[in-house]
Image (cartoon, grey):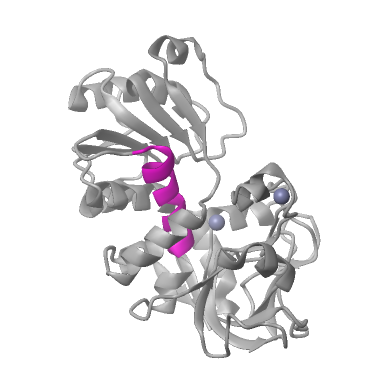
Amino acid sequence: MKALVFYEFREGCLELREVPEPEVGPADVLLRVKAAAVCGSDIERVHCRSSSTVTPVIIGHEFCGVVERVGAEVRRWRPGDRVVSENTGYVCGECYACRTGKFLNCPERKLLGGKLDGGFAEFVRIPGDVLAIYPQSLRRLPDNLSFEAGAILEPSCNAYFALIQEGGLQLGQKAVIFGPGAIGLFAVAWAKLAGAGQIILVGGSENRLELGRALGAHQTVNYRRAGGVPDAVGSLIGPNQADLVLDASGGGNVLADAIAIARPLGKIVNIGWAGEHRVNLDPAMRKGLDIIGHLGYDTTSWDRVLFLAGQNALDYRKFISAVFPLEEWREAFKGMEERRYLKAVFTF
Ligand SMILES: [Zn+2]
Ligand SMILES: [Zn+2]
């Protein structure tokens, strides 16, 4: 089968290869990939900036498809089922995170498309070991949803988890979202649906900010043009007025701005990976802020998002910039890296 393989932990070691189809053990599910999306973290991975990677590995962790074949012990799935993977390939099943159902926080977790073979391939094996501990790591795709949309459910779950579950957004609240990438823009769309009173999107690209306004942001701030982001946001919602700030940008200075913008006793959810945050936390203590470290999603996020997607609550097409066959992976990666594409999706 064709697969996009990161074959050595070295810059540029990515190529389309012919590899054997995965073998299917008695508890495994073999998925025929129908669509898979490129994530910002795939770019980081092939530039050797991700620790959750082994080589050689087939990358791609945002994917969906159809069950092709199941092992003899599998009862839950049948060939032909339309499914989306939440991309967990292994968890220990014993740590605190696993015991409380927070599988993404398992220190032993292996990502399909990071430490185990993932979805930029014609087929991907969902290991029986993980399905035994965490059956919900494989989900039924709602009938109304296209495979292209199915491939980008994952970042929308991510945004839902940050905004609604961790951030606890309530009707009428003021939300400020930094970073108009896929997660930030999904957060804008969910905030609109959830009835946020005011949604402010902060970013550096006019095209993305415009898309943000189309998705429901009431106002946008271009940090390249604004004198200072806290003042610019303050002029829109009042100083120290944000009930909730999401940092989906990964900018090292954003946490300081978020602290300045948040109201006393407000919340900040940190989604983006900055490497290093340059910030004085004293003002956050004075305000009594909750600063929440975010990772991924949980089963509840997937339950809710699959339900909402099944009701056509979001138009997922607005988030897909381009669709390619896997052979054109270079252009898909280039466009993502240059931020010309919000989401590039491979179809099979
Ligand atoms: Zn991702
Ligand atoms: Zn664990």
Q: Toward which corner of the image does residue 116 lie, by quadrant?
A: bottom right
Q: Is residue 162 magenta?
A: yes
Q: Does the image show residue 65?
A: yes
Q: Quadrant of ligand 1?
A: bottom right
On the picture, is 246 further left or further right than 278? Answer: left
Is 304 in front, or is 250?
304
On the picture, is 172 further left or further right than 43? Answer: left
Is 258 in front, or is 47?
258
> The N terminus lies in which quarter of the figure?
bottom right
| Residues in magenta, as a range | 153-168
Kindly identify the residue that appears in the image at 75 percent across and 83 percent down.
Answer: 24
Q: Is residue 289 magenta?
A: no
> Residue 30, how many percent across, how many down?
66, 82
Q: Is residue 28 above or below residue 103?
A: below
> Residue 119, how many percent across, how many down?
62, 72
What type of secondary structure mainly makes up the magenta span? helix
Is 227 in front, or is 238?
238
Q: Is residue 344 above or below residue 82?
A: above
Q: Toward which corner of the image does residue 90 lie, by quadrant?
A: bottom right
Kindly identify the residue that appears in the image at 38 percent across and 43 percent down.
Answer: 163
